[in-house]
Image (cartoon, rainbow, N blue to C red):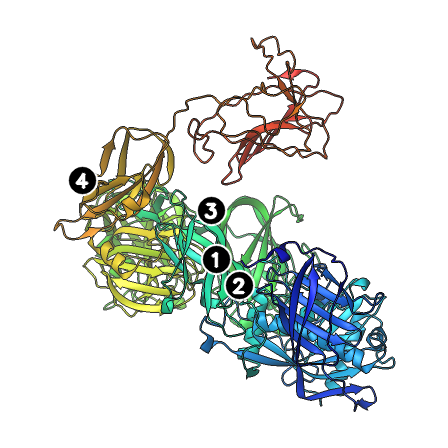
Amino acid sequence: MLISSLLLCAALQQAPSQLALPSGLPDHFVTTLEVNGKSVRMQLQRRSLRADEFVLENSSGVILEVPESRTYFGVIAELPGSVVAASLEPYGLRASIFLPNGQLLRMAPNKSRGNNWHTIRVAEDPPLDMCGSDDVHLKEDADHSNNRSVSTPPPSGGSHYLSPYPWNWTMRKSRIAFDSTYDHWLREGQTVAGVTASVEYQLAENDLMCSRDAMVSYELTGIVMRQTPFYAGTTSYALLSEFANEWSTNQQHIPYESVVLLADYQGDGIAGLAYVGTLGSWGYAGLFWDRGYSPGIIGHEVGHNWGCGHIDCWPWGGSAMCGSWLLYGPESTDIIQWRANDYLKLAIIDPYETPVRPYANPDWMTADSQRDNEFDVLDNDYDANFDYLHISGVDPTSDEGATLSIVGNGPGGRDVILYQPDRTKLGPYSDSFWYAAADFGGLEHWTPVTVEVNERNLVASYKFEEGAGAELLDSSPNNYHMHAAGPAIYADTQDPNIGNGCNSSPWENSGNLFDNDHGSVFASSDQGVVITSFTTDPADGTWVELDFGASTTFDGWRHLDQDSSRKWVGKSVLYFSPDSFFDSNDLAIEIEHHSHGDNVTYPFAAVTARFVRWEVIEQYDQSSTQHSLGAKETSFVYNANMVELAMPSVVLESNSQAGNGAANLFDNDDNSAFISDNQGAVGAALTTNPNDGTWVEFDYQSQQTFEGATFLDLSNAAAYVTTSTMWFSNSPTFAASDPSVTIHHTNQQELQVIDFPAVQARYVRWEVNNATFSFIRTTGGRELKLFGDPVLNSPFNRVAGPFGDGLEIESRFSANVATGAPTASDQAFTMSVYVNPSVNLNDRTLISGIGDTGASDARYLEVRNNSLHFAGIDIGFSLPTHSWTMLTATYDGSELRVYDNAVLLGTFSTSLSASDGSIHLAPASPNYPNAFYQGLIDEFSIWDYAMSDAEVADLAIGGAACGPTPFDTQRNINSSQRLEWVAALNSPQHDVYLATDYYQVRDATTASSSYYGRQANNYLDLQNLNPGQWYYWRVDEVYANGVDIVEGKVWRFKTYLPWTTVISEGFGDGNSGDHLDGLAGGSGFSSAWSVPANNDYIRYSGSIGAFPTNLPLTETDGYLQRRATSSLPMEGQRTFDSTAVEVDMSSDTTIYMSFALSLNGGSNNMSALVGLLDSTTGDTILAGVEDGNWAIRGAAGDLTGASAARNQTTF
């Protein structure tokens, strides 16, 4: 950074300086001034910002004698990077000197001394909270400039609109006008020239700022001077309203994008107001009276007009929008450029004439911890003079220890920053550093870069090699194990009694909620949502209270909404109470309704209660004029804890219509059915006469434990089954003595779940006993499934897969883990799974994925209409049956790529919604009961980065080694250690590399000294590793042909350093009465004590006091004493000798610490803490006394104990 000694020693107030100033208004001149005793030259060039048709008026009309422009721009010759805006006035030179470090110096005539004496001082920063614009209601209009304020939003996500090439940059011209109130007229000496010069001087400063920072230069189109009182408002809002109306009504002849009002209301403290026609919103500033007319106020208010809020306190500590600095921050410049370039399309002008520094935009980068990362930070930087840019400086190291350098590898050979992360750190973590963008004249701007350092990690990998059981183990180090089971089976509780409720018509009353009739409705009398929770007013919203007669356990609730979307429920609340009096102490569960055409089950954590209250709190269509909310059907459900059994085979059946045989009951297809050949109910129980009634017998091939069933009736209501019987036998011949279950059918329009006591059998018979109408004899059903004990019935079979064991799934199944997967909308991932479907998968079948299975764009491999989809996107690929396919999906935050056996199927630009972190294998599809995966499945894995095409191809070969032991960056490893890893697929051999240098391992080949040979096993035993040393190792997988080699990641571990000394400080060195700072006694330290000089830590000779009698300890070396004064700084620290001891607070090391402490005096809340500080992370572990109590504090957690004894020594 180019900062001279002049800049470094600039004082707040300089001694007066006498200037030699020219007479008149020359085109350019040079004057010499002194700053801190140094003589420097100010070089100034006259340049007016007035428009060609500049208008100067008062309240009566046009002012004919327009004063000449007194505006100058220039530089301090001896201070590169400085820039000056000035006004040469009859009584002297007013100037603002912008220094390259962002500081602003103000020079003004010293009128008390006269004779061209001037004073220079550092400008004060206005307070950050001075603006009141947020108190003004912002309006929206349609077009042009008639009292409107456009609210078009700025670009989101930090986009920048310029490139580092001058021929792509644009400077824009924005027209601005000023309204000078009577107060301003008085302040500026009641002269036209004074007011004009004041306006132009302030605008010159703002023009420098906005041109330099946002590539927009101002053109002054007019000034209206109020030489008599004009505005009546005495508050900022009243004044702003008058001002806006005046300019939209009476000043349309003056062209402008923005107008600034200069006011001076002592009672309100207003120093400047800004109104706009086409830039954005109104704004105003509330300032302290003695601030005067800081030009930063104008920049702040016009910034509001551009559409900027109170933003940009970061990264430079303040800005025009955060404290009225003469500097626009990165968010503001984005907004201004967007409006100027894309929205308003302002006139393009030539590059800025006055030399100004470039604008270096802050950057947000991502880095791979394993790679050397190049950052093209100049890509969003620019220069108002259109000078080419380069990087003139960068921090040598980042906050997190990355090595930084400048290399010329960017587009066109321009500078980029090489970022090499600290190879001992495990991502993800955030890092930052600063760099300077400079032009060829040496003008530069420093700005920060924020880096998100990521690891390329395996999140989870399921190989299905467990051998038995329902547990599916994750072979990654994360241990995201799954438990496999069938989906939850929910059965209806008993129907409740209806209690109090809202007003409703007789034909739409609450009794219809549980009548098992989709044709009836419960709806309030056009009352909408509940206004007062727990209301007992039947006219307040839609609500009902229910009594289940006894304490009941609920695991969910079903709701079928009305047909009209104008009456749909958006949100509702269920309250559960042990008594009939509901209040805020009762458990509340909020339901967010969806899939309104379906009878939706909303599961929730089990709750037990007798009384339930339902309130509607939000209507789905909030613009609807129809408010008769409610439901066609509701029911409460419990988890029956059953699992669907495998499909049986039909043994015997009654006569059926052609194509409608009994096998259709078990085909998982709601569109097929078993329909009797006009035979109705059976005449004789257990008949085997195919002409007698409707019945079927089926075989489960082995004895099962049956615990329930589900049945879906025909769609013909006239043929509904009302009673049926299910018989169970271990013989293919049924007898009256066999166990049986009678089923009373209700709500035949829905799947009915029947829960019954467990019964063991192999054969099952189902027969129809009664139907709705005895003369309608085409009875039957669409679906019949039986359920068993989930412990006894694994939801899958373990069979041979392409790589060891795989899973065979024949019925509805679900395996998931609640957390672990990438969740953010822009977070990268890769997902891969081997599938071999046994059938053409039904519509909406989910294969595997991440997040909520009910979301329309959830991150799932899915089949819709026989075509593969991912996150709702049609991939255009039909999944083959009876053959293995490796499906892979990668997402980099903006682009989805899907592969079939490593062949790219398509690339799709998309933005995925954020999801929860759950991982799912073959989950049930909500509201699609027959959509489930059927077939074989193997090798399901997820990574937290987007693989390249080459990496996906490597995955198809077998992939890379994973799951290292020791785990990556593990510390305190023994000097004799076994290295282990999870081998990739296809039984590869393993090339192993190990060294103490990261690059030596990363770049190694089999000819390198770090090569440890080709291993047949997935482990390597090491001996005699150096203590306290970081080691790096890599495993490459070598496949059968010896040609296909998949390179592995570099893993890291650190060996244990045995201590060669004890850390001890007895305060034995120095003289009695010495201050602690600089004392260097004791052992295990690499430096002396470093403590603030005023913290009153004093070393004394002798003993701290007698130890407790149970401790055989004495000491006379010395002790440390400090007065118990809370105002004194307490901290002091000393660094350990890392060659002799290692205190690693990021590991699982056990460290013992002891010290003696004596609290002397009468205070009950003294503090004295001793402990450890990790200088890298800032983590601490402290022990001792805090506020009079024994305490432990720090990163490991906080603990407070009993009161500490006073006036005695404690060890």
Indicate which label's residue lies in the foreground, 2 or 4.
Answer: 2
The residues bearing labels 1 and 2 have C-alpha atoms spaced at a distance of 9 Å
Residue matched to label 3: 400
Q: Residues within 10 Å of mark 4 (few under 14, many from 20)?
A: few
Q: Classify the position of the C terminus by image quarter.
A: top right
The residues bearing labels 3 and 1 have C-alpha atoms spaced at a distance of 18 Å
Residue matched to label 4: 1013
The residues bearing labels 2 and 4 have C-alpha atoms spaced at a distance of 52 Å
Q: Secondary structure at mark 2?
A: strand
Q: Residue at x 34, y 47 (%)?
A: 460
Q: Position of residue 50 (x, y in %)?
A: 68, 83
Q: Secondary structure at mark 1?
A: strand
The residues bearing labels 4 and 1 have C-alpha atoms spaced at a distance of 44 Å
User: In the shown orientation, is residue 123 left or right of residue 590?
Assistant: right
Q: Which mark is residue 444?
A: 2
Q: Secondary structure at mark 3?
A: loop
User: In the shown orientation, is residue 335 left or right of residue 950?
Assistant: right
Lower sequence index among marks 1 and 2: 1
Tag 3–tag 1 contact (CB < 8 Å): no
Lower sequence index among marks 4 and 1: 1
Say if residue 737 shows up in the picture: no
Residue matched to label 1: 393
Q: Position of residue 1137 (x, y in %)?
A: 46, 29
**Placement of 1105 over or under 294, stated as above or below:** above
Q: Position of residue 231 (x, y in %)?
A: 84, 78
The residues bearing labels 2 and 3 have C-alpha atoms spaced at a distance of 25 Å
